[in-house]
Image (cartoon, coloured by chain):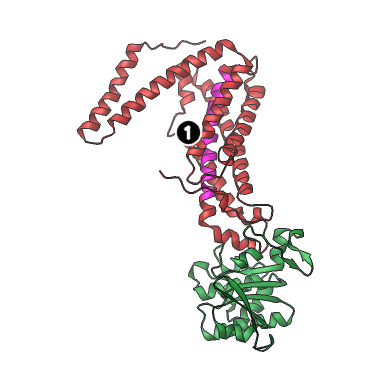
């Protein structure tokens, strides 16, 4: 719900700003291009993978990094596994080149190799200047990737210190 | 005017025996619909008799005021009907206002267009032409808008995640809702397209048969029917586009968010 509110998908109160610009001064669609959001259950509007990835040359490199073959483009969405959907939704968001990425359990249900590939891919983007707000239930994952950790417990937010610098994985 | 055969009340009473036979069949087979059948038949007879009287009065008055009031009443009743046919209504004034407003805009526009260009009665608002014409356009427009809005709201509910996926990637509300909008418009116009392609082969339209029964040469009646079909297609098209786009506008907001919270809970039926 917090991520949906930051991406401005639900009516919400509070002030959000990006690089000093208040969200209310930026039109909704432009805001969401700057602040990408990958939900835990991403939606699909066309039949094949390729139709969801507008810029195919830009997506090809990211797809390879996440372990997808070239022919992924023609795969029907209906036949994808949950893990494939999550990773493809991440590709879809990354090729928009957002400044901030909001991730909701992006590695839930992935095998260890895919988890590592996703974490490495995002770490590369973070080094290139991307800011990420990553929601996870896995403290070990939080330890691996986070520069700053916020724990949400019983409705309140508590700050924890990140053990690792962000460039480590 | 060509000849037509007037009916007396005995003729009608004789035909009503058919309904009584239907009711008898319902009792024999235990269908349990004889009550509603008889109530519907009596309602039909009473309603039509009343409208016959109202039309007689309107036609003898030829008053723009009274014709206008009759038109308004028809549109408001049609608006009520559109609202009744929604599984999920828009909240507030929109549920009645959107369908009614769009029907008013398109049916009045198309009727006025026909009266001022093709039929040209004198005066142009002569209720003998205006009322039946508007009735036919309005009836079809009502079906189209009811179907279009219903498809829009149900598919937005069902395909919420696909619409929001596009919003998340920075699509505008119109782009994100485009697939759903197209479906809604298609289902709104489908009955009109089907009736145009089947007419003359499978069914003879009521207006045309009516004219033929009253002694109008078939070729002349056909010309009228073709005109009316075009008017219906135009009226339904304008009305449905306005209503569906209005629905998308209402169910999204200026921040390009999907606002399904502006829909009421489903109708218990």
- Residue A149 rendering spot, x and y as whole percentages: 64, 80
Nearer to me, B250 or A82 = B250
- Residue A106 rendering spot, x and y as whole percentages: 57, 75
Position above or below: B85 against A86: above
Residue A119 in magenta stretch: no
Please, what secondary structure does the residue beneath circle 1 have? loop
Q: Residue at x 51, y 38 (%)?
A: B83
Q: What is the letter of the green chain?
A: A
Position above or below: A165 against B20: below
- Residue A32 rendering spot, x and y as whole percentages: 68, 64
Specify whether residue B217 is in view.
yes
Q: Residue at x 67, y 76 (%)?
A: A132
* Image quadrant where residue A152 sits: bottom right
Q: Residues within 10 Å of mark 1 (few under 14, many from 20)?
A: some
- Residue A2 rendering spot, x and y as whole percentages: 61, 67
**Is the stretch drawn in magenta largely helix, strand or loop?**
helix
Position above or below: B143 against B73: below
User: Is B20 positioned to the left or the right of B135 in the image?
Assistant: left
Nearer to me, A38 or B226 = A38
User: Is B96 positioned to the left or the right of B256 in the image?
Assistant: left
Nearer to me, A141 or A152 = A152
Find the magenta span and give its range.
Answer: B128-153
Specify whether residue B192 is in view.
no
Q: Colour of chain B?
A: red
Instruction: Name the residue carrying label 1.
Output: B199
The quarter of the picture where the C terminus of chain A appears is bottom right
**Chain of the residue under the numbered disc 1 shown in the image:** B
Residue B149 in magenta stretch: yes
Task: Please tell me how many numbered marks the rendered image carries.
Answer: 1
């Amino acid at each position: 719900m917090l991520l949906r509110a930051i991406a401005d998908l639900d009516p919400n109160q509070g002030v959000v700003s990006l690089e000093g610009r208040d969200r209310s001064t930026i039109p909704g669609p432009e805001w969401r291009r700057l602040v990408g959001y990958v939900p835990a259950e991403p939606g699909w509007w066309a039949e094949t993978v390729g139709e969801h990835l507008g810029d195919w040359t830009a997506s090809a490199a990211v797809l390879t990094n996440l372990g997808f073959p070239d022919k992924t483009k023609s795969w029907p969405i209906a036949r994808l596994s949950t893990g494939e959907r999550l990773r493809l939704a991440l590709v879809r968001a990354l090729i928009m080149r957002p400044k901030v990425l909001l991730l909701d359990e992006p590695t839930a249900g992935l095998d260890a190799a895919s988890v590592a590939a996703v974490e490495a891919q995002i770490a590369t983007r973070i080094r290139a200047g991307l800011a990420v707000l990553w929601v996870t239930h896995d403290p070990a994952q939080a330890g691996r990737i986070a520069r700053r950790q916020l724990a949400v417990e019983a409705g309140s937010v508590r700050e924890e210190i990140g053990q690792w610098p962000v460039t480590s994985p | 005017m060509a000849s037509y055969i007037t009916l007396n009340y005995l003729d009608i009473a004789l035909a009503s025996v058919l309904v009584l036979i239907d009711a008898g069949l319902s009792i024999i087979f235990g269908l349990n619909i004889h009550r509603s059948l008889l109530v519907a038949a009596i309602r039909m007879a009473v309603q039509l008799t009343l409208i016959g009287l109202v039309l007689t009065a309107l036609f003898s008055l030829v008053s723009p005021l009274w014709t206008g009031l009759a038109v308004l009443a028809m549109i408001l009743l049609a608006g009520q009907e559109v609202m009744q046919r929604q599984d999920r209504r828009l909240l507030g004034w929109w549920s009645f206002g959107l369908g009614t407003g769009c029907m008013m805009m398109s049916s009045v526009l198309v009727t006025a267009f026909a009266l001022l260009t093709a039929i040209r009665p004198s005066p142009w608002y002569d209720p003998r032409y205006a009322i039946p014409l508007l009735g036919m356009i309005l009836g079809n427009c009502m079906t189209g808008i009811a179907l279009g809005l219903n498809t829009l709201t149900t598919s937005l509910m069902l395909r919420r995640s696909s619409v929001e996926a596009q919003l998340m990637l920075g699509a505008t509300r119109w782009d994100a809702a485009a697939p759903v909008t197209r479906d809604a418009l298609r289902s709104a116009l489908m009955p009109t397209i089907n009736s145009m392609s089947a007419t003359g082969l499978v069914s003879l339209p009521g207006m045309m048969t009516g004219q033929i029964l009253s002694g109008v040469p078939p070729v002349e009646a056909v010309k009228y029917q073709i005109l009316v079909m075009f008017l219906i297609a135009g009226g339904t098209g304008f009305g449905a586009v306005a209503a569906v786009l209005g629905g998308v506008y209402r169910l999204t907001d200026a921040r390009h968010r999907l606002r399904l919270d502006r829909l009421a809970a489903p109708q218990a039926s």
